[in-house]
């Protein structure tokens, strides 16, 4: 019975070592893939997410400012237009109309 227990202990140690090695290989592969992707992104000159979000927020604010300014311009243009006045009929225009 002692030899059977020893065989199982050896198999358990071997499996534990193999599992540890497999986890180490997985970690190395993850790092390698991450490095390759980062290099590819850098070479493609892509924008980082933080910069994209900052520019998007600035664009939204500028859009709001432009809309407000367009409304103000339209209001000023409407106030600047002369109001049409009704012409009074004079005696000479009344005779010509007849």
Image (tube, rainbow, N blue to C red):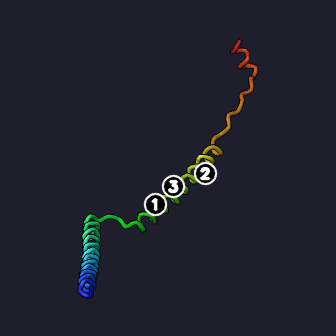
Residue 1 location, quadrant: bottom left
Q: CA distance from mark 3 to mark 2?
A: 14 Å
In front of the other: 60 or 92 = 60
Please identify, in this view, whether the residue under mark 3 or under mark 2 is nearer the observer: 3
Residue drawn 62% across the image and 48% down it: 76
Name the residue tied to disc 2: 72
70 up-or-down from 47: above or below: above
Q: Is residue 17 visible?
A: no
* x then y, percent, for residue 57: 49, 62
> Which quadrant: the C terminus?
top right
Residue 24 location, quadrant: bottom left
Name the residue tied to disc 3: 63
Asked which secondary structure carries label 3, the reply is helix
Residue 87 shows which numbered tag? Answer: none
In front of the other: 60 or 31 = 31
Judged left or right of residue 47, residue 28 is: left
Residue drawn 63% across the image and 41% down it: 81
Q: Is residue 66 visible?
A: yes
Q: Residues within 10 Å of mark 3 (few under 14, many from 20)?
A: few
50 up-or-down from 11: above or below: above
Q: Residues within 10 Å of mark 2 (few under 14, many from 20)?
A: few
- Nearest to N terminus: mark 3 or mark 1: 1
Do tag 3 and tag 1 residues touch (Cβ < 8 Å)? no
Name the residue tied to disc 1: 56
Do tag 1 and tag 2 residues touch (Cβ < 8 Å)? no
- Nearest to N terminus: mark 3 or mark 2: 3
- Nearest to N terminus: mark 1 or mark 2: 1
In front of the other: 53 or 25 = 25
* x then y, percent, for residue 4: 25, 83
Q: CA distance from mark 1 to mark 2?
A: 25 Å
* x then y, percent, for residue 9: 27, 84
């Amino acid at each position: 019975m002692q030899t059977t227990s020893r065989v199982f202990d050896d198999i358990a140690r071997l499996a534990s070592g193999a599992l540890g090695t497999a986890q180490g290989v997985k970690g190395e592969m993850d790092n390698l893939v991450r490095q390759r992707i980062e290099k590819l992104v850098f070479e493609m000159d892509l924008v980082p997410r933080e910069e994209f979000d900052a520019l998007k927020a600035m664009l939204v604010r500028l859009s709001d400012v432009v809309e407000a300014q367009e409304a103000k311009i339209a209001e000023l243009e409407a106030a600047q237009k002369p109001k049409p006045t009704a012409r009074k009929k004079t005696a000479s225009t009344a005779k010509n109309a007849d």
